[in-house]
Amino acid sequence: MDLTFTGGSTCKVSASEIIRALQAGGRLTTLARAIAEVGRIQKTIHLLTFVDDESYRRSILAQLNRQEGRHNLGRAVFHGQRGELRQRYREGQEDQLGALGLVLNAIVLWNTRYMNAALEHLRSQGFEVRDEDVKRLSPLAHGQINLLARYHFGMPDVVRGGNLTVANSPPLPRAA
């Protein structure tokens, strides 16, 4: 957090230093108690809105479902290590999690490109594709991906040319 004082000088204060200052002597200061009360007000407003507003509950549930879908994909990809970080050191664990994130992003990108191509193909064939149906699609699906296979990451000429391919099918039209 940057603090600017009269006279224009600026200093940086970390969140941990602010928390330490609000807990002088191991007890909360008056300011800390006031901040906690404001937080309780916001929590109460959230809970009352949640109870009262069905569309608010639906939007929260939709977000939870998306996040759970991402966790399911992560567990499926990470199953080879039984969901365990095997590296002893923090840097090794960060590398392992970074690699997992990279693979998840690659799967989401792959699925998004192919879903886009499939939707464009349907539209070009005269099928009605409704926006409310498209909103329900998720790029987190992974049933079509063999997570136990060995993959070669050379790029075929067809893909290098900007086309997408489907196994045993002619290339799909280029995605815009």
Image (spheres, rainbow, N blue to C red):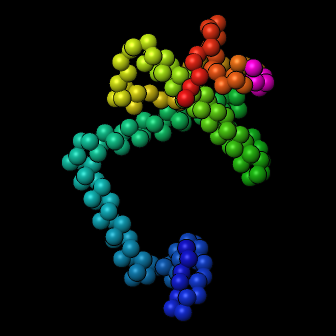
> As displayed, is residue 86 above or below residue 150?
below
* Residue 119 included in the magenta stretch of the image: no
Going by the image, does 135 lie left or right of 156?
left
Q: Is 160 or 36 nearer to us in this picture?
A: 160
> As displayed, is residue 19 above or below residue 157?
below
At horizontal 51% and vertical 91% (from top left) the residue drawn is 6
Look at the image and tell me whether residue 80 can be seen. yes
Q: In which quarter of the image is the C terminus?
A: top right
Q: Is 160 or 131 nearer to us in this picture?
A: 160
Going by the image, does 87 lie left or right of 124?
right
Q: Quadrant of the N terminus?
A: bottom right
At horizontal 45% and vertical 16% (from top left) the residue drawn is 124
Measured from the top left, where is residue 41 in percent x and y? 29, 65
Measured from the top left, where is residue 74 in percent x and y? 60, 34
Q: How many labels does the image show?
A: 0
> As displayed, is residue 168 above or below residue 60?
above
At horizontal 59% and vertical 22% (from top left) the residue drawn is 174
Measured from the top left, where is residue 139 in percent x and y? 52, 29
Q: Main secondary structure of the magenta part?
A: loop
Going by the image, does 57 lie left or right of 124?
left
At horizontal 72% and vertical 25% (from top left) the residue drawn is 160
Seen as rendered, the residue at the extreme top is 168
- The residue segment tinted magenta is 151-157
Look at the image and tell me whether residue 75 can be seen. no
> As displayed, is residue 104 above or below residue 23?
above
Seen as rendered, the residue at the extreme bottom is 7
Measured from the top left, where is residue 110 in percent x and y? 61, 28
Q: Is 103 or 26 nearer to us in this picture?
A: 103
Q: Is 3 or 37 nearer to us in this picture?
A: 3
